[in-house]
Image (tube, rainbow, N blue to C red):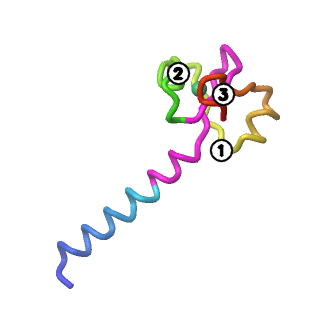
Amino acid sequence: MNKRAIIFLVFAAVMLIATSVLASTYVGNSNTKKFHYSSCRLAKKIAPHNRVFINSRDAATELGFVPCKVCRP
Ligand SMILES: [Zn+2]
């Protein structure tokens, strides 16, 4: 295997891991106390200083966040 193929494989693996991590992450709004899937269009509108990244649904409800009515996480 040449060096280029190895670099490509490592890059592809990193991208795959990054994508799956992002897809499983919930985003909360510390201002409105709502949480969304990170893919929700409303999640993208949360001001950066109000944005809270949450790993699980349970963690979000424990923190007092309520699910978004648009993406229904
Ligand atoms: Zn949402």
x and y, in percent, of residue 72 in the image: 66, 31
- Element on which disc 2 rests: loop
Q: Are marks 2 and 1 in contact (CB under 8 Å)?
A: no
Residue identified by numbered label 2: 42
71 in magenta: no
Q: Is residue 3 left or right of residue 70?
A: left
Residue identified by numbered label 3: 35
Q: Residues within 10 Å of mark 2 (few under 14, many from 20)?
A: some
Mark 1 residue type? Asn
Residue identified by numbered label 1: 55
What residue range appears in magenta? 18-37
Instruction: Give the position of the N terminus as an image quadrant.
Output: bottom left
Mark 3 residue type? Phe
Q: Residue at x 48, y 19 (%)?
A: 45
Q: Residue at x 82, y 34 (%)?
A: 62
Q: Residues within 10 Å of mark 3 (few under 14, many from 20)?
A: many
Q: Are marks 3 and 1 in contact (CB under 8 Å)?
A: no
In which quarter of the view is residue 50 placed? top right
- Element on which disc 3 rests: strand
Residue farthest top in this picture: 31
Mark 2 residue type? Leu
x and y, in percent, of residue 17 in the image: 46, 58
Instruction: Count the numbered circles shown.
Output: 3
